Amino acid sequence: MSIKTAVCRSFDRDALVKGIEQPNVKAVIYFFSIEFERFEVHKAFKQAFPQAACIGASMMGGWCVGGAVEKGIVAMSLSSDEVAETFIAMQEGVKRDPALAAEKVIDELKRKIDYRTINPDTHLGLVFFDGLGRGEEVIKRFTFERGFNLNLIGGTAADEFKFVRTLISADGKSSDDGVAVMVLKMKIPFHCGHYVHCLPTDTSFVITNADTVKRIVWEIEGQSAAAYYAKAIGVSGADKLTAAHFAKNPIGIVTGGWRGGEATVYIRSPGAVIDGKGLQFFCYIENGTRIHLLRTGDIIAHARKSLEDARHYLLNVQGALLFNCALRYVEMRELNKVAEFNRVFEGLAFAGFNTFGEEYFTHHNQTLTAVFFGG
């Protein structure tokens, strides 16, 4: 038994099931294009693996052993050789009250798990939720929950940059307004990390008017945020800004880097111009925050480094789950490096998807969060 993966670019239930089928499947994780909703993917997996915990999310392209996928389904199964126990919970209401939805999921999990037995060395949490909600509030509740001491990693569901409807699913149920968490008590070692390929420049500025709830920055240094940002990156006006500009020119909070040490970057990427003046972000930014303009590094070299980093902690890396920002995916498409990124992980049993936000202790964007599985 081992970690198994499958990929289909058109819906083929039998091929998907055959690809990940193995004795004693304990967990099934899958990602699918929003157009595949009509096939009720969540029901198909649960019917095929009724004894396993199943969790999934809609994607903007996916990653798999069989090659990068623009449209389709990717899936992974873990067996009883890798996983001792599984616990799963799902709640709705993320759009209306993300904090409350998270609290309900935590309460549901606590009814199923003796939280006093949770050990971050053995327990892994996978979290997926509606990509159009406020992910910061969801993850904050998990991070500060007393006694819920585990590695929680994942990504928010996505669509094709339409920002209309995203889906998550758990054990045969699906929602466009939900949060789902799978907790795995692992038998094998694992390593989690977050990886940013963008580097800080010397250009920085202060956010002076922001609506954190709506993730809109209205003013930078007292000026129209969209116009200020456009000028900073050399674009003639706010009306000329595109998704490609946002992908190549993120901004971020920079910490550390003192005394020659390596700085840590938490990216805050704009995704749209609002009313010709404001910038809509994928993560909120508070008033008074100093932000640095970032430059993109080598995304392929950076991906290789993430794998090297995992191999530093794990003697044998046999598989991985990858949660990659949709803006990084846009950048890869612009540079024609989608297939090259996927090839970095050749030799592993891996699967993943492009998200509207990445989770690992906090809510990230334009980041790769990943969990690597040892032998």
Image (cartoon, rainbow, N blue to C red):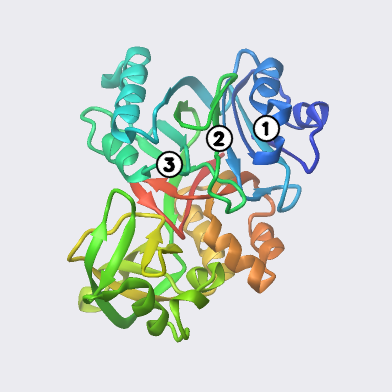
Q: Quadrant of residue 326?
A: bottom right
Foreground disc of the pair 3, 1: 1
Q: Which residue is mark 3?
A: 153
Of residues 320 and 249, the one drawn nearer to the viewer in this rendering: 249
Looking at the picture, how far across and down is residue 181, in whole percent?
44, 29
Could you say where residue 70 lies in the image, as x and y percent from the top left?
Answer: 71, 52
Q: Is residue 200 visible?
A: no
Front-lying residue, 19 or 141: 141
Give the secondary structure at mark 1. helix
Separation of disc 3 and disc 1 at Cα?
A: 24 Å
Q: Residue at x 37, y 35 (%)?
A: 121
| Drawn side of residue 288 relative to residue 45, left or right | left
Above or below for 124 versus 111:
below
Q: Which residue is mark 1?
A: 37
Expressed as whole percent of the image width and height from the top left, the position of residue 256 reads: 24, 68
Q: Position of residue 31 (x, y in %)?
A: 62, 38
Task: Work out whether mark 2 precedes mark 1 in sequence or the reverse, and give the earlier one.
Answer: 1
Q: Earlier in the sequence, mark 2 or mark 3?
A: 3
Real-space Cα distance between discs 2 and 3? 18 Å
